[in-house]
Image: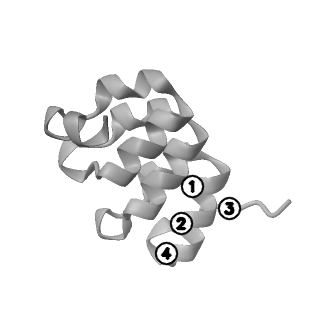
Amino acid sequence: TDKIIISDPRQFTYNEYFKAVSQNSNMLYYVPDELITEDLYVLLVKEDGYYLQSIPDELKTSKICKIAMEQNKFAAQFVPDKMKCYLC
């Protein structure tokens, strides 16, 4: 498999970051804020719904929360209150 070696993460494109995060969720730490998208969070919660707890509430969407709960029903505890009725 292709491995990504980090030399200078500031030089990565969005697609390179996406690939890195898909291989190792800890790589999200290196993604600049302006390149973090809903798709990156969806990728993470598809693998582990519990990752929802690490996403700031203001960035959680109904799509992200729904996928997280489908992957792990216990992720529901990390859904913001304002979305709970909507997702039921």
Dot 1 and dot 2 residues touching (CB under 8 Å)? yes
| Type of the residue with mark 3 | Ile
Given the current orientation, which residue lies at the most extreme right position?
A: 1
Measure how far apart labels 1 and 3 are at the Cα level. 12 Å
Q: Position of residue 57 (x, y in %)?
A: 21, 42
Nearer-N-terminus badge (3/2): 3
Q: Which residue is mark 3?
A: 5
Measure how far apart labels 3 and 2 are at the Cα level. 11 Å
Q: Which residue is mark 2?
A: 17
Q: Residue 21: which numbered mark, if any?
A: 1
- Where disc 2 sits, the SS reads helix
Q: Tell me the mark number nearer the camera, choosing from 3 and 2.
A: 2
| Type of the residue with mark 4 | Tyr
- In the rendered view, tell whether residue 10 sits above or below residue 70: below
Nearer-N-terminus badge (1/4): 4
Nearer-N-terminus badge (1/3): 3
Q: Nearer the viewer, residue 41 or 61?
A: 61
- In the rendered view, tell whether residue 25 sits above or below residue 6: above
- Packing grade of label 3 (10 A; few <14, some 14-19, many >=20) is few
Q: Nearer the viewer, residue 75 or 3?
A: 75
Measure how far apart labels 1 and 4 are at the Cα level. 11 Å
Q: Position of residue 71 (x, y in %)?
A: 55, 35
Residue plotted at (60% across, 41% down): 47
Q: Tell me the mark number nearer the camera, choosing from 3 and 4.
A: 4
Dot 3 and dot 2 residues touching (CB under 8 Å)? no
Residue plotted at (39% across, 49% down): 64
Measure how far apart labels 1 and 2 are at the Cα level. 6 Å
Dot 4 and dot 2 residues touching (CB under 8 Å)? yes
Kindly indicate the quadrant of the structure image that contains residue 75. Answer: top left
| Type of the residue with mark 2 | Tyr
* In the displayed structure image, the side of residue 54 where residue 6 appears, left or right: right
